[in-house]
Amino acid sequence: MPDIDHTRLDAALDALPKAHPGPGGVAGVMKDGQIVAARAWGYASLETGTPLSTATRLPICSISKQFTCGVLLATVGDPAKLDAGVADFLPRLESPLPTVKQLCDNQSGLRDYWALTILQGAKAEQTFRREDALPLIARMKTGHFAPGTSYSYNNSNFRMVGELIERATGETLETLYQRHIWGPAGMTGAELTADTRHPADGVTGYEGSDATGFFPADNGIYWRGDAGISASLDDMLAYEAWIDATRDNAESLYRRLSVAPSFVDGAPASYGYGLSHEEIGAAAFTGHAGALRGFRAYRMNSREERLSVVVLFNHEGSAHGAATRLALAAMGKDAPEPAPIAQSWDSQWLDTERGMLARIETGRRTATLQYGTGDAELTCDGEALRSDGLVITRAGDGLTMLRPGENTTRRLTPLPEIAFADGAEIAGRYRSDELDAEMEIEARDGGVYAVFRGMLGEGRRERMAAAGKDVWRIATRRSMDAPAPGDWTLVLGRNAAGAVSGATLSCWLARGVAYTRL
């Protein structure tokens, strides 16, 4: 990599507040172990006028996962030593148990417990205590796939890993983070702020956008292992400097964490030990995103380029997009200009096996796929739509969606869209034995809503809309964790007489939850 063009990098930094509007943010870039740029703009609190600085601590959220895996390697060594303890957390699981390594690689096949809080009746702002997590996880009976065969992001995995580490060592994660990472890296301000009601330095996270305005996010969840660390930009750049200083030591924690992951069949994976593996500007990077309502974060490092980028927002802009912009500027590269899309891909399909809707909307040069938690932006190379880790091609009247990072190929069946379906036909109570929880569908003069009741109470009414024959969307735009699951797909089941007898409910984080109509 040539020397950094500081003029170009400064221009990219100058553009961030407009490109990713919000109350404030911080961003930093390191090259060859040295800070080449660090910025802080806006406010930690719009209400008090407290400015953000490079020393202000913000939640780094799921970036914490790599720290949890780091202390696992530092204290236990081989994750297999703790495999026997996994059964304690999953007493009802009917499928094979995952290994601890599969938990660390998001290859367990289990459903995400933050997504399941919605089906257990949680409201976005309510308190989720430390003691609520393990009973919720313990209710799982089935999973998405056999452990090790595919990938599915799942916070439950790292919550269990954190608990296993504390049981094995007899010490808290706070103590272990400090001894094995924060201390050696010089992260003097890092702290485990597991209770999100009490953020470090009084910083406020904001929901909303320029279109709606920004308003303070009210978070009440308790998390540790899967998230929970707060750190300043100064702390995170110290971490990146430590990574660079130990880059040639094969036994260093980050080298061990960033080893190339794979699935049980030997196929390469794109996630391992709490780190995502991606390519930006033809350079290999490892990193991770973080999200809580009102906050977004991203950090990444390229060992070959000796380049690191950190972006932390106290709003819900794309920290990954901002970090990518800075990385490309630092490398003196431009994002490729997408080619015009010659034909329309606009329609909707059903991933029948997963019970998930897929919708594509075509623009002039990009298309948007609605399938996972967030929309994916796609470009077209003539015969296929593509984004990182995703290729969509036509297959007869359907589509084939290749997802190498998940080690899977999805078959998408056309689903003709309908404008209306009779909500009265599906209204009533439904029960999930998997969750030991209920869903009630209410039809009110053409409006249809779902409400979930379970171990966490009674949730808010969530809007439903008919998508196709016997397929409905349930929109969840706000939840305890962030980003919210988005759209759930409800696929109806009918008995021999044609009456609705049950349904399955799916989102990317929690698929195939079966309900029986009462």
Image: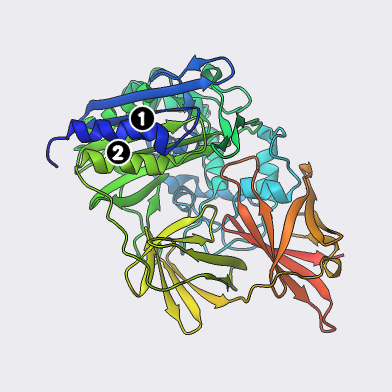
Query: Which image quadrant is residue 325 in?
Result: top left
The residue carrying pointer 1 sits among few (fewer than 14), some (14 to 19) or many (20 or more) residues within 10 Å by Cα, namely: many
Question: Is residue 257 something that shows in the picture?
Answer: no
**Above or below 11: residue 119:** below
x then y, percent, for residue 330? 22, 38
x then y, percent, for residue 43? 49, 21
Q: Residue at 72% x, 62% y: name it.
A: 465
423 lies left or right of 279: right
Instruction: Please report contact status of discs 1 and 2: CB closer than 8 Å, yes or no.
Output: yes
Q: Is label 2 in a helix, a strand or a loop?
A: helix
User: Where does the N terminus fall, quadrant-wise?
Assistant: top left
Display colour scheme: rainbow
Label 1 – label 2 distance at C-alpha? 9 Å
Q: Say what amino acid the circle numbered 1 marks.
A: Ala
**Which residue is disc 2 drawn over?**
326
User: Where does the C terminus fall, quadrant-wise?
Assistant: bottom right
Q: Residue at 70% x, 44% y: name it.
A: 135
x then y, percent, for residue 136? 69, 46
x then y, percent, for residue 204? 56, 24
Nearer-the-camera pick, 251 or 407: 407
Q: Say what amino acid the circle numbered 2 marks.
A: Leu
Q: Is label 1 in a helix, a strand or a loop?
A: strand
**Which residue is disc 1 drawn over?**
27
369 lies left or right of 142: left
Q: Which mark is residue 109?
A: none
Query: Which image quadrant is residue 133 in?
Result: top right
Nearer-the-camera pick, 193 or 149: 193
Q: Earlier in the sequence, mark 1 or mark 2?
A: 1
